[in-house]
Image: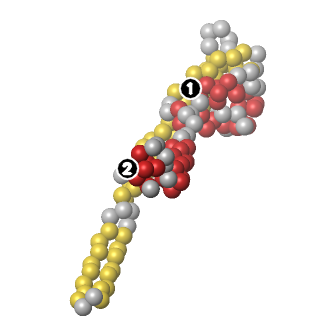
Amino acid sequence: MARIARARGYRSRGSRLTRSAASLALAAALAACATSPPDVAKAKQSWQGAAYDDVVLAWGAPARSTTLSDGRKAHTWVNEVNRSRGEFYPSVGIFGGSGNVGVGVGVGTSYPFGRELMRCERTLVLGEGRVAEQTWTGPDEYCETFRKR
């Protein structure tokens, strides 16, 4: 009977459920991996037109300041952070035993693969006391964290 049903194009209920479950699991796995890309443009836009005092309240005093030939002020803020690139977890295991009885000992530790210096430099040019132009330099994933809150 099962052969006849398959020959006619019928599928058993179990195979449909298995395929549905597999499709659902694949979709969930892909959704879990999805992250939104950093958006520095939105971060910059959040500060456009902001007052100098608001920027200082959020970021602190600028690292450098200068007056341009047209009289406008340019201020630069610099932030740096060291981030771990990942970790390696070596372990040592000792096993001994006989007669279906075993004893094990494990020792583990972690070592960072290295550190990565991330630096975001933001230069804001003020016209009439408000942000008129901006230049941001650095990795998008770090610089976007300086958006206005």
Residue 104 x, y percent position in the rendering = 32, 81
Residue 34 x, y percent position in the rendering = 54, 41
Residue that label 1 marks: 136
Could you tell me which secondary element the residue under label 1 belongs to? strand
Rendered residue at 53%/44% (across/down): 27
- Answer with the quarter of the image where residue 58 lies: top right
Q: What's the CA distance linking mark 1 and mark 2?
A: 26 Å
| Mark 1 surroundings within 10 Å by alpha-carbon count, few (fewer than 14), some (14 through 19), many (20 or more) | many
In the picture, the disc for residue 114 is 2
The amino acid beneath tag 2 is: Gly
The C terminus lies in quadrant: top right
Residue 13 x, y percent position in the rendering = 53, 54
Could you tell me which secondary element the residue under label 2 belongs to? loop
Residue 29 x, y percent position in the rendering = 51, 48
The N terminus lies in quadrant: bottom left
Return the residue nearer the eye: 120 or 102.
102
Return the residue nearer the eye: 39 or 98.
98
Rendered residue at 57%/22% (across/down): 135
